Amino acid sequence: MVGPSQSPFKTLNSLPERWKNCYTPISSIDPDIYSMVMVPIGEDELLAVINNSPHHKAPGPSSIPYEWFRLLSSEGIFYLCKLMNSCLAKSDILEDWRLASIVPIPKPHEFECLLKNTRPITLLETVQKLLVKIITDRLSRIMTKYQVLTGNNFAGLPGSSVNTPINILDGIMKSHRVSQIPQEFLFTSRKNRILTPFGKTESYNLLIGIDQGEIISPLLWTIYFDPLLTELSSSAISPYIWSSGIPANILNINNNEDVAVPITQLTYMDDSTLIASSLAGLEQLLSIACDFYFLNNITANFSKYELVSLSAGNNLISFQLNSEFPDHLSSMGFSLRALRLSSSFRFLGVWFNLQGSPNFVLSQLKDIYSSFLASVRFKKLSPVQLAYLHSSVVLPKAQFRFQVLYLSESQVMRIVNGYYGLQHKAFSVVHTFPSITLTSRFFSKDVNPYDFLCERLLCHFLSWISLLSTGSKQANLVLIML
């Protein structure tokens, strides 16, 4: 949770030495590299962003969707481009573009008239999102080309993916078992209102002018947390050293040298996991993070922290965090009970288990299909409608849970057996008719679930392997995984 800045340090020079070094502009980076971010927008650039915009997205307060902009004539594109360039030139946007609507979607438990029991999504003006997308793309390309960010956040920049930190954490756990930004005019004086069953609420001002659904949010989060992630990596006293553990004379890769990478954190946007090889090392990382939160007025919820350790058992572990500026922030302590080895924990929506047991994920996959069957069992759906819901709704959800797990075809078919029972009934065929045949194009456009899940695993693997040829900082991580 972030609020307006309340830091007692008002200038760069007044910051403690550690953070002064973190926030001092990098001398090797020329500030002129950002000059292209605010140049006038060309019609071809605008058309490219419009054509690449997503389909079937809920629009903002004006109710104008992306699809309408694809129907604009050349004259319409000209005037839209002129309007956007006027915004850039004046460092201001239209008043109507500052208004957004919030839709609170209920969580799967009792509402109890509490907003915390909802998942709010923010609906922004589509034309403003197009403008922000252009600026975001420009800024991302510059930061990637000149390697401005060094904190190794896996979000916000071209080529970044949530699959990378998931694969790294999976690899670490398997190794144990085996062995200047143009924001002034975009994000100020913003207003939101909430859409309720009883109508729209009155508009209210935002304390922090960046909406949750803003296109540039991933990049801004990456920039925002980069000083912390860079400092965690450079100052860690006991990082976890992830290595292949293969003797140099066995595999002729990387000049016959064993590959080893120190890891202190895995971060995707603002979702961070700290990693250390000792309790003292973890306390140090937490202390650095706590100081960063204080400087940036972030409130950390220690009750949501989870401790995963192979050596702590199920014991209660105490942490003592010491600040580098005790005059402003006193030391604090808290305790966490380490998860049992048999317990599963979630990282970026995927569930892991220290013992490598697939049982929890298997139960989730079964629950996905059970919930789907309970929803459609008594609905009058044709085989084609069932196949569409299965391939477009159920399988993508199952695939996300399945990212670090391989199941045999027989295991998959046992999980989806109930679904094929519905398909047998919809096609009016006997229950002994081979279920796998129902995925044939002669019956419906359904997808073979085993083939679908294997195809996604292979796609993620090939995407992961492709990092080898990019020369990026993740290349050594790929070598270790291999």
Image (spheres, grey):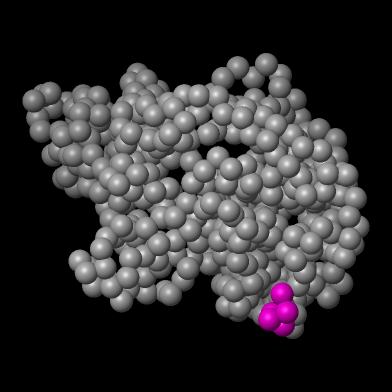
Quadrant of the drawing holding the C terminus = bottom left
Q: Nearer the viewer, residue 404 or 323?
A: 323
Q: Start and end of the magenta stretch?
A: 26-30
Label the magenta part by its dominant secondary structure: loop
Residue 394, located in which quarter of the rendered image?
top left
Residue 157, located in which quarter of the rendered image?
bottom right
Q: Can you give x and y, in whole percent of width and height, for residue 397 in the image?
A: 40, 39
Q: Can you give x and y, in whole percent of width and height, for residue 102 in the image?
A: 71, 39
Q: From what the image shows, is residue 145 above or below residue 216?
A: below
Q: Residue at x 78, y 33 (%)?
A: 200
Q: Left of 182 or right of it: where is 452?
A: left
Q: From what the image shows, is residue 326 above or below residue 183?
A: above
Quadrant of the drawing holding the N terminus = top right
Q: Residue at x 32, y 58 (%)?
A: 244
Q: Left of 228 or right of it: where is 433?
A: left
Q: From what the image shows, is residue 174 above or below residue 310?
A: below
Q: Residue at x 36, y 65 (%)?
A: 259
Q: Nearer the viewer, residue 66 or 21?
A: 21
Residue 1 appears anywhere in the view: no
Residue 315 appears anywhere in the view: yes
Q: Left of 430 or right of it: where is 372?
A: right
Q: Can you give x and y, in whole percent of width and height, for residue 419 in the image?
A: 26, 28
